[in-house]
Amino acid sequence: MEKILLLFLLLPGFLFGQNHEANIKKIFDTELTKGHTYENLRYLTKNIGHRLAGSPSAAAAVEWTRQLMESYGFDTVYLQPVMVPHWIRGGRTSCESLTQKSMVCWNSPLLLW
């Protein structure tokens, strides 16, 4: 009796279960033919450019993405404040190894060949 009851409980799941693979393929195919993903990627790379952490381009990309999500009608779009360290390039430095344990470094002018 328990086996029959278990069969009746599990059978609808097998008969009416979703075919995830087919659904994923449908979403993928629709996006490739009718979607905006490649256009969004083109805009980010051509118009905004590099997006190094802490750079003005990264901030522009975040704001553009927020506006894009709002234009898509997402019900909740917000930015969370974060501390993003960024690197500032210093002057050119040259170093020379004197021994295995010591090294000497100095600022050197930019040489153009």
Image (spheres, rainbow, N blue to C red):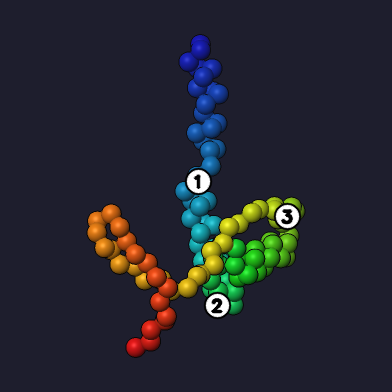
Between the residue at mark 3 and the residue at mark 2, the CA separation in whole angstroms equals 25 Å
Give residue 40's position: percent from left, percent from top: 58, 70
Mark 1 neighbour density, 10 Å: few (under 14) some (14–19) many (20 or more)? few
Q: How many marks?
A: 3
- Residue 54: % across, % down: 60, 63
- Quarter the C terminus occupies: bottom left
N-term mark: 3 or 2: 2
Q: Badge 2, how many Cα within 10 Å: few under 14, some, many 20+?
A: few
Q: Amino acid at mark 3?
A: Tyr
Is 29 drawn above or below residue 42 in the view shown?
above
**Element carrying mark 1:** helix
* Local secondary structure at mark 3: loop
Residue where numbered disc 1 is placed: 20
Q: Residue at x 34, y 67 (%)?
A: 95
User: In this rendering, which labeled residue sits more in front, label 1 or label 2?
Assistant: 2
Query: Residue at label 3?
Result: 78
Q: Earlier in the sequence, mark 1 or mark 3?
A: 1
